[in-house]
Amino acid sequence: MGLGHESAHMATILIIGCGAIGAQLAALLQKQGHAVVGLKRSPPNTTSAIRYVTADITSQAAINALDLAVDVVFFIVSADGRTPASYRDVYELGVGNALAKFARQPWFFVSSTSVYGQTLGEWVDEASPAQANAVTSQLIRQAEQRVQAANPLNVVVRFSGIYGPGRTYLLQNARQAPAIQHTPPYFTNRIHQHDCVEVLAFLLQKRLAGVALESCYLASDDDPAPLWEVVSWLAARMDCPPPTPKGPTINPDSNKRCRNLRLKALGYQFQYASYKEGYGELLP
C-alpha cells in the first residue's frame, strides 16, 4: 500500500533494532522525508542515508550516554535466542533502559501475537485476554504493559508470524510431507514482511497527522488458516506429496485466529491479504 509524502509532518525517528524490518522501515521513512536514526549493536559498514549509532540496549551506561534529539521511537528488537534469559535481556533490561532514556517521546513497540494463550481456535483481538503460557511470551506481555504505562501515547503493535523473502521455513517444511494436525484445525496467523513495514509507517503517518491512535493494534493478514490447509496448498504448487494427518497436539502453546479489524478500521489495506498472495510470490 503506497504512502504519500506528508511534507507537513516530517519527524526525526529513532529505530531501536534495525534488523530486516527496522532497516526496511528506515529506508521507507527516509524516502518519505523523515530523518532516521538507527540504533544497533553492530551497525552495517556500508554507506547509508540512515544515521546509525552503536549501542547495546542491555547496557544502561551505553543508552544513557546517547546524545540524540528524536521525535518518535520505534522499538523493533528480537531476542538473540529462544531462552528466557535472551528475552529478559531485550524485554526487561533493554526496554527498561530505553524507556528511561526516551521517556518523553511517543513509542511504537513491536510485539507478538504469541502473548495470547488461547488454544481452541478462538478469535482474538486487542480486547482479548493476553495470558500466554510460555515464559518468553509472558516477558513480551510484561514489556507491553510497561511501555503502555510509561506514556499514554505509546502504541503496541502485535505482529503474527512474519514471512517473506528469506523467511522460507514453511516452504522447506512443506516439501517433506510433514505430519500435521488435521482435526480439529490448528489455526495459524501470519503477516508478510512488506506489510509489517507498511503498517508501522502507516501508524506513524496517522500519529503525525494528529489522529488519536489506540494503545494496541493487532497486525495479521485477513486469512487465519489451518496449518493443514496452508501446507497442502504449498505442497500442491510445488508438486510435492501432501502432508500426512496426525492427531491433536497435547497442550499446544496456542491455536487462535487473529482479527485485524481495528487496524483496517483506521484505513490500512494489506498488500498480502492471505498466504496465497504472499507465498505465491515466494514459490520457486
Image: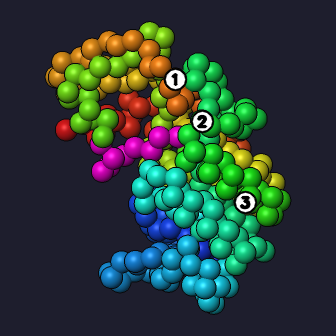
Three-letter amino acid code of the residue under disc 2? Asn
The amino acid marked with disc number 3 is Val
Q: Earlier in the sequence, mark 2 or mark 1?
A: 2
Q: Which residue is mark 2?
A: 133
Could you tell me the amino acid type at mark 1? Asn
Q: Is residue 69 above or below residue 231?
A: below
The numbered mark at residue 251 is 1
User: Neighbour class for label 1 at 10 Å: few (<14), some, many (≥20)?
Assistant: few
Residue 202 vs 208, above or below: the answer is above
**Residue, x 36% and y 77% (percent of image)?**
44
Q: Is residue 233 visible?
A: no
Q: Marks 3 and 2, Cα distance to the nearest angstrom? A: 21 Å
Asked whether the residues under the numbered discs 3 and 2 touch, taking CB atoms below 8 Å apart as contact, a structural biologist would say no
Q: CA distance from mark 2 to mark 1?
A: 10 Å
Cα gap from disc 3 to disc 1, whole angstroms: 30 Å
Residue that badge 3 annotates: 147
Camera-nearest residue between 112 and 29: 112
Q: Is residue 125 magenta?
A: no
- Bounds of the magenta segment: 160-168
Residue 41 on image: x %, y % = 45, 76
Q: Which of 1/134 is in front? A: 134
Mark 3 or mark 1: name the one nearer the start of the chain: 3
